[in-house]
Image (tube, helix red, strand yellow):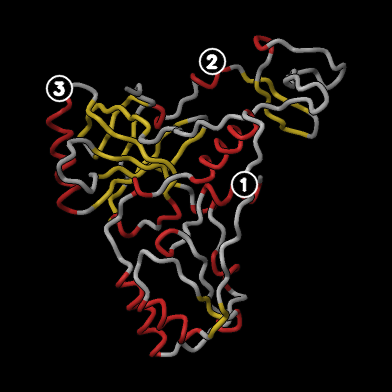
Amino acid sequence: MARPYWSGQIQISLVSFGVKLIPATEAKSDIHFHQLSRKSGDRIRHQKVSSSDEERVEKDDIVMGYEYSKGEYVQIEPEELKQLRVESQHTIEVQQFVGIDEVSPAFFEKPYFVLPENEKQAAAFAVVKKALQQTGKVGLGKIALSGREHVIAIGAPADSKLTGMMAYTLRYAAELRNASEYFAEIKNVDVDDDQLSLAKELIKRRTAKFAPEKFTDEYEDAIHELVEAKLKHIPLKKQEKAPRGKVIDLMDALRKSVKEPPQKKPVARASADEGLSQRGGKHGLKIVGTGEKRRKSA
């Protein structure tokens, strides 16, 4: 079981109780690459050296430095950082409550499980958790983690059977780019009512309960297949290109999509000038996420 990543107090006005935070995510990928010399096959090792004389510097002799002027640094020791007088290192002071739907998903960064620090804290913990659950609110405060101070949202989990709470570090507003600047180049298009009706029907027919376990990392599977093929000195099958299908107009694409059973791959796509295209995948849906990003960068 994972160890607490942070322990301290949650304070709401005059009410306070001890909690511990445990990361709610973990790395499951088995893919690990090392850098090798193409010529010898030996592993490449990196050494930390001084920029002035290229002399190797041992780990114990490395300290952090803050560049206050070009090429001028102040050395900072780890112990000095621990002694900083920042309240959020030990206390999350809830400054306000907001509806969970008021926080845009773009702000959410990393989830944590919140547990009472011990049995003595359980009563206050349970009262606050139930109050958050019944009001549909989350408490916003700040917490010092990983060398910086984060905004944090604390609330009850969606599953009422779970006895703990959830916390999410949030991005600051200044860290989010202005969407309107990027969307400004998109021209307004009059939406045809019939096309809209078919699109809504398509969404309705393909709506299902969220089951995250159904989505797997196919890129990782492909890497393992590649490694196994190279170890066995057998050729790897080339990836087949997904059939593009016949280019038809948007209305026909929508009609055929609505009629098509969910388990089949779509065979048609709308033309580019109609403003809609489809990419085939499992159940006619292509999920673009971490695996897709890695595929592009590979």
Q: Please report whichever mark, 2 or 3, sits nearer to the chain's N-terminal start.
A: 2
Q: Are marks 2 and 3 in contact (CB under 8 Å)?
A: no
Q: Position of residue 107 (x, y in %)?
A: 44, 52
Q: Secondary structure at mark 3?
A: helix
Q: Secondary structure at mark 2?
A: helix
Q: Please report whichever mark, 1 or 2, sits nearer to the chain's N-terminal start.
A: 2
Residue 119: which quarter of the image? Answer: top left
Count residues near mark 2 (Cα–Cα under 10 Å), then give few for <14, some for 14-19, many for 20+: few
Residue 153: which quarter of the image? Answer: top left
Q: Position of residue 166 (x, y in %)?
A: 29, 40
Instruction: Quickly name the residue at label 2.
Output: 79
Count residues near mark 1 (Cα–Cα under 10 Å), then give few for <14, some for 14-19, many for 20+: few
Instruction: Quickly name the residue at label 1.
Output: 237
Of residues 54 and 102, the one drawn nearer to the viewer in this rendering: 54
Q: How many marks?
A: 3
Q: Position of residue 257 (x, y in %)?
A: 41, 76
Q: Are marks 1 and 2 in contact (CB under 8 Å)?
A: no
Residue 109: which quarter of the image? Answer: top left
Q: Please report whichever mark, 3 or 1, sits nearer to the chain's N-terminal start.
A: 3
Position of residue 46 in the picture relative to residue 246 (left or right): right
Considering the image in quadrants, where does the C terminus appear?
top right
Position of residue 117 in the picture relative to residue 65 (left or right): left
